[in-house]
Structures are given as structure tokens and as C-alpha cells.
Image (tube, grey):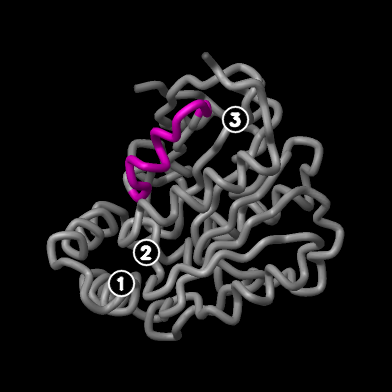
Amino acid sequence: MPYLTVNKQRIFYTSKRGTPEAPNIILVHGAGSSHLGWPAELRQLPDYAVYAVDLPGHGRSDPPGRDNITAYCDSLDAFIAALKLDNVVLIGHSMGGAIAQMMALRHAEKVAGLILIGTGARLPVSEMILSQALTNFATTIDFINRYAWARGTPDSLIEAGRKLMSDSKPHILHGDFVACNTFDIQERLSPIDVPALVIAGSVDMMTPFKLGRFLADNIPGAQLVVIEGGGHMMMLEQPGLAATAVTRFLQEKFAFPQQN
């Protein structure tokens, strides 16, 4: 598994090869997560080169993390430049979706398309999370996982999500949620000029459906797919539906010669 040094910071990522003519896919995870927050169905998309990055301070990447979306965006931009990637489609979940949107605004020449999952143009955070993440880490993680999953999600999946977040550090998790809470580009969506897909869970309690609807209504030409019964972690709860929506969008918007 490769590391890449970006601005003197080692960044970990996984990758798989794809058809040369197909877009390069980069998976950008959410707050307190890592590349492991993505299901195999998306990390192994057939035909596409897929890069699943651990953001600074997350997973196997070196600290520090960041406490604002712009800083994470600039780190991702440097990552793309270091790998010399073009024709990039960003798939971002939650905070990762905010980073993807900011990339489309700040570094538009690097972004060919956006797939935004469980995210919004603003990401308000519960005061409980902001006030307790540093001092009551375990309690905060329990609180987050109480609302991150749809009712009926298997306990084993919820526990795996809780362990993944527990592997983070309190200051990293706090910084992530500060970044989310201060993010608001509701008035800046119209300049985004790339094909965009918004995937929203109908019962998402962390990023309510109305925020996904707002994105789809205000990014020019954006499509909206609703995962019925999907919570905030919809791509893990219903990976087949998420992968199908992603694949259909890519095939429609980024046609390329298929391998025989």
C-alpha cells in the first residue's frame, strides 16, 4: 500500500488500476474516518482507477489534521498534483463532500465531476459534539454513532464504524467537526460547472435530506438519487445501491471505449 509525501507530510492511499480512457476516481472520506470508511463496492469499481485517500491525520496518514475545509481541499489538490492525475471525479462523503465542493470552486481545472454522498453546502454540527470531542471522546463517538446509522443496521456494522472512529484522535475528530461547522458555501454553488450527482439518504439524521436536495437544486445540472431508508452511512448500509447509482452516473457522463 503506497504512501505519498505531500508538503512534507506522508499521506496514505490505496489504489486500483482502471481503463486508461476512464476517469480517475478519488474517494474522500468523512470526519474521523479513513479509506476504510468506503465499501469494497466503491473501492473496487470495475473499469475505473480508484484512489482511496486517508486525509491528513487520519488512518495511516501522518498528523496533523486540519480544522477547516479549505486546508483539507488544498492538501487534496497537492495530492492530485503529486500523482499527476487528470480527468478526476471526486466522490466525497459528508466532510469529504464539502472538500470535493471546495475543490470544484478553488481548483476547478483539476475536477471533471462530483459525486456527493450524505453532504451539503453547509454542515452544522451538534454543540454536544463540538464541546465534548476533546474531553469526552468515547461518549462523543457513542453519540455520533447513535445518529449516523439507519434503524435496523446490523450491530456488527455499527460496531465496526465505532471502532474506525475510535482509532482517530480526539483533536483530529474535533478539528474535523470544527471544519464542518464553519463550512457554508450555500451562496457559491452556481459557479460549479461539472457533472454532479448528489446521493442522499431519506432518513439521514446527521446530514438531513433537505441539505442534499438543496445541493441538487443549486448546483447547475446536478442529479439527485435518494436511497430510501438510508442513514448517514448509506454507502455502507446499502453499498449495492450506492455503487449502482455511482456507476450509472459515470457511464452516462463519462463514456469511454469499453474493454473487450
Q: Amino acid at mark 3?
A: Asn
Residue extending farthest front = 260
Residue shown at 54% from the left, 16% from the top: 259
Q: Taking 115 as reference, is 169 left or right?
A: left
Q: Nearer the viewer, residue 259 or 32?
A: 259
Q: Are marks 2 and 1 in contact (CB under 8 Å)?
A: yes
Q: Nearer the viewer, residue 253 or 113?
A: 253
The magenta span reads 37-49
Provide the secondary structure element on which disc 3 rests.
strand
Distance from Cα at disc 1 to Cα at disc 3: 29 Å
Q: Is residue 154 visible in this depiction of the protein?
A: yes
Residue 107 magenta-highlighted: no
Label 1 neighbourhood size at 10 Å, few (<14), some (14-19), many (20+)? many
Distance from Cα at disc 3 to Cα at disc 2: 23 Å
64 over 53 or under it: above or below: below
Residue extending farthest left = 156
Q: Give the mark nearer the N terminus: 3 vs 2.
A: 3
Find disc 2 in the rendering and name its residue.
233
Q: Is residue 130 visible in this depiction of the protein?
A: no
Residue extending farthest top = 260
Q: Give the mark nearer the N terminus: 2 vs 1.
A: 1
Residue shown at 64% from the left, 75% from the top: 213
Provide the secondary structure element on which disc 2 rests.
loop
Give x and y (percent) for residue 39. 34, 46
14 over 204 or under it: above or below: above
Residue 149 shows which numbered tag?
1
Q: Amino acid at mark 2?
A: Met
Q: Nearer the viewer, residue 1 or 92?
A: 92
Q: Amino acid at mark 1?
A: Trp
Q: Quadrant of the N terminus?
A: top left
Find disc 3 in the rendering and name its residue.
24
